[in-house]
Amino acid sequence: MSASPKIVLMEPSAIVRCGLAALLKSIDGAHWQIIEVPEAAQIKTTPQCLHADVLIVNPAALGEMSLPQIKKNIDSETLKCIALQTNLIDHSTLQFYDEAIAIYDSAEQIKEKLLKIVHEPKHTARREVLSSREKEIIVCVVKGMVNHQIADHLCISTHTVIAHRRNIAAKLEIHSTAGLTIYAIVNKLVELSEIEIHSDQ
């Protein structure tokens, strides 16, 4: 990450967006580049957003655009995403973010969270505990394979597949095919064009 990290702040409320931007700029010793955008669609048309280091985004304001699509538009391999919570957000949504900032956090709490996320290596989070085999199984699941098909494809027993899936669910705290699909796309295990949306079995 560069000495002067580029932070994209996406929030539709001008009061919240400008207030947070002012707070970030006031942090002693922090030299951010703050790019403010009110809505997801503008990220694609704002050249300054390209190759950003950090995205602070209100998940409730994503609309029809997904987090993976926004990451693709920003075109950054090391982008870290921070959820800006202005209301209650389900835990299953937050698990796809590297950190969360609540509207009621103090200035000191926001400073600590942002400095931590800026300076820590990108892939130290929970996602890296998956083994290569577990990642292969996730890919099979999101492509619509059932347990016996995965077993045949990977030349392992169905019992082993079930054990791996149990471990994956425990490690990621994701218990649905839809959740694994989002995880796989966000973490670039599969391309969106490779999969179809399947209902949970």
Image (cartoon, rainbow, N blue to C red):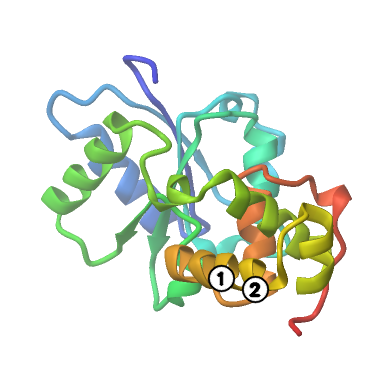
Q: Residues within 10 Å of mark 2 (few under 14, many from 20)?
A: few
User: Which residue is at 17% across, 44% downward?
Assistant: 112
Quarter of the image with the C terminus is bottom right
Q: Residues within 10 Å of mark 1 (few under 14, many from 20)?
A: few
User: Which residue is at 39% across, 75% downward?
Assistant: 87
The spot of residue 118 in percent (x, y) is 31, 33
Label number found at residue 180: none
Q: Amino acid at mark 2?
A: His
Q: Compared to 29, does 186 lie above or below?
A: below
The spot of residue 2 in percent (x, y) is 38, 16
Label number found at residue 163: 1
- Label 2 sits on a secondary structure element that is helix
Q: Are marks 1 and 2 in contact (CB under 8 Å)?
A: yes
Name the residue that disc number 2 marks: 159
Camera-nearest residue between 146 and 100: 146
Camera-nearest residue between 88 and 159: 159
